[in-house]
Image (cartoon, rainbow, N blue to C red):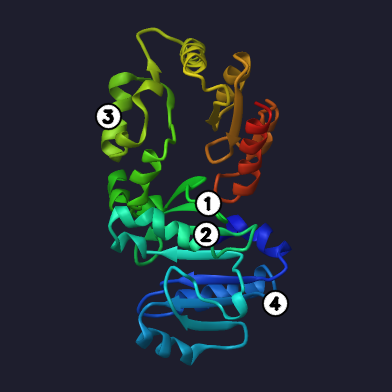
Amino acid sequence: MLHAVCPIIRKCVDPVVVDLGYGATPITTQEMFHRFRKYIRSDIEVVGIEIDPVRVKQAAEISEPGLDFAYGGFEVPLPNSRKPIAIRAFNVLRQYDESEVSKSWKLMTNRLAPEGFLIEGTCDEIGRRSSWVALRSQESEPETFTISLHVGSLEVPSEIAPRLPKALIKIKELGWENGILTGNTNIRMFKKLEILKIANYFNEDFMFSCNFNETREDITERAKKILKSAGYSNSFIVGDTPRDISVAKKYDLKVVAVSTGVFSPKELEKFAPSLLIRNLADDLEIFLNFMIGLSSNN
């Protein structure tokens, strides 16, 4: 998940990353350090922080130049008031009440370097099911929410539900609006949402499904009218097919093409989307800049 901020880490002046709440063993922290040193920056430093002093003492046995361990919590204590470029906090806030989430986010983002990111989430023991939110320095609201799955290890899609961060509920409370535009019938759309157990995370006012003999053009035109009347002038569609792109453009809607489906980036590029990315994790910074541009042009 930290690969999303790798370009920022490469450019920063003080490359220090914090792994907050590394748990009973510091293996993930050590592995992250070695990967960063090998692939990102040879001078990067990683500090593992734990609230349990016994764990800190045990982890200190594997310390090496550039890899250190310290006692602390959400205040992220670093010597000489250093500010980390990134904080990774996994399987930490899931142990807290939802009412504590925003306060904890704020404590951590206030400790970041000005261009830094907090990556907060949860995963299973071997990392095959994980989800996380990303927050910028000094911010208290997430900019993105990502789910990462090893599909072959799932018996049913709803198995991801226990790994959703508690903070997802908070995101909805903060006013985010997620909609759906699909060629599925209304019944089929809600059936899929029920299976995935994610219906509560979408605004029903902005769920656009196929009514009777509607075409994709009909659905998109209806969606545009409703979004416009609701005051959402900066709305855009995320799709993974040439059809998604062409129909969105027909109705003067911005469209972000994501090459995670059956179509390659080269195939999607032919249809000139507003933005073309590989996926929302690897191209996070590009995607965020696109949204910022829409807001500034409004």
Residue 271 lies, with reference to residue 50, above or below; the image says above
**Which numbered mark, 3 or 2, is in the foreground of this view?**
2
First reached walking from the N terminus: tag 3 or tag 1: 1
Viewer can see residue 268: no
Q: Are marks 4 and 3 in contact (CB under 8 Å)?
A: no
Where residue 259 sits: x, y (%)?
58, 39
| Mark with earlier residue (4, 2) | 4
Tell me the tag on residue 109: 2
Q: CA distance from mark 4 to mark 2?
A: 23 Å
Query: For the residues marked 3 and 1, what is the alpha-carbon distance in whole angstroms?
Result: 36 Å
Q: What residue does disc 4 label?
A: 43
* Image-based side of 48 in relation to 282, left or right: left
Q: In the shown orientation, is residue 134 left or right of residue 162? A: right
Amino acid carrying mark 1 in the image = Glu
Q: Nearer the viewer, residue 164 or 34?
A: 164
Quadrant hosting residue 2: bottom right
Compute the Cα span from label 4 to label 3: 50 Å
Pair 4/2: label in front = 2
The residue sitting at 38% across, 60% down in the picture is: 123
Q: CA distance from mark 2 to mark 1?
A: 6 Å
Residue 92: percent from left, percent from top: 36, 65
* Disc 3, SS: helix
The residue carrying mark 1 is 139
Check the picture and name the quadrant holding the C terminus.
Answer: top right
Residue 191 circle label:
3
Q: Depth-wise, is mark 1 or mark 4 nearer the camera? A: 1
Residue shown at the point (37%, 75%) measured from the top left: 23
Could you tell whether 241 is left or right of 89 in the image? right
Q: Foreground mark, 4 or 3?
A: 4
153 sits left or right of 231 in the view: left
Q: Are marks 2 and 1 in contact (CB under 8 Å)?
A: yes
